[in-house]
Image (cartoon, rainbow, N blue to C red):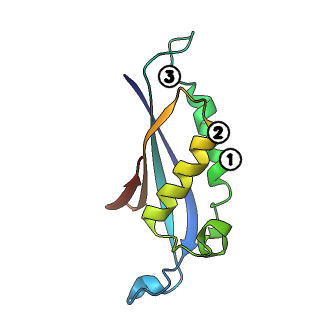
Amino acid sequence: MYELVVHKTFAGAHNLRGYEGECEKLHGHNWKVEVTLKSEKLNELGMVMDFKIVKKTLNEILSRFDHSYLNELEEFNQENPTTENVSKVIYDNLSEKLPPEILITKVKTWESENCAAAYYA
């Protein structure tokens, strides 16, 4: 099994509806997203997938989040934009855009240097 890891960042604000504490107030983060992909085989060039393509695809997804108020995005109309839910939304969006032989092992999202949450199927 082969593994590929890509990191990207975005800046975005959110607030946690129904939370009792500071995070109920509007606040922002410089989020870091770590995507781990795997494949049983390498392509004809000896890669799981070209890093450039993975980064471009991830950029397309994260561009909607960057410098936005996450609560206003359709994905977070009903769900709180927690770090866990942000990871899940990125996972879902990315899985739709990858070739079927490339699997997502994990999407891990960091809201700060010391706090992260991950989603994987």
Mark 3 residue crowding within 10 angstroms, few (<14) / some (14–19) / many (20+): many
Secondary structure under the numbered disc 3 in the rendered image: loop
Give the alpha-carbon distance from disc 1 to disc 2, as whole Å. 10 Å
Instruction: Please state which of the two labelled residues, at mark 2 or mark 3, is closer to the viewer.
Output: 2
Which amino acid type corresponds to the residue marked 1 in the rendered image? Glu
Front: mark 1 or 2: 2
Q: Check disc 2 and give the amino acid type.
A: Lys
Q: Which residue is mark 2?
A: 97
- First in sequence: mark 1 vs mark 2: 1
Callout 1 touching callout 2 (CB < 8 Å): yes
| Farthest bottom residue in view | 20
Q: Is residue 14 left or right of residue 34?
A: right
Give the alpha-carbon distance from disc 2 to disc 3, as whole Å.
Answer: 15 Å
Nearest the eye: 40 or 72: 40
Residue 50: x percent and y percent?
58, 25
Task: Residue 40: name its quadrant.
Answer: top left
Check if mark 1's residue and mark 3's residue have beta carbons within 8 Å.
Answer: no
Task: Name the residue at 55% across, 25% down.
Answer: 49
- Mark number, residue 11: none
- The answer to whether residue 71 is above or below residue 102 is below
Q: Amino acid at mark 3?
A: Val
Q: Secondary structure at mark 2?
A: helix
Which residue in the structure is indicated by mark 1?
A: 60
> Which residue does the image show at 49% across and 15% down from the upper left?
42
Residue placed farthest to the left in the image? 114
Residue shown at 62% from the left, 66% from the top: 75
Query: Where is mark 3, residue-wise?
Result: 48
Q: Where is residue 98 shown, x and y percent of the image?
A: 60, 35
Image quarter (top left, top right, bottom left or bottom right) of the N terminus = top left
Q: Secondary structure at mark 1?
A: helix
Residues packed near mark 1 inside 10 Å, few (<14), some (14 to 19) or many (20 plus): few
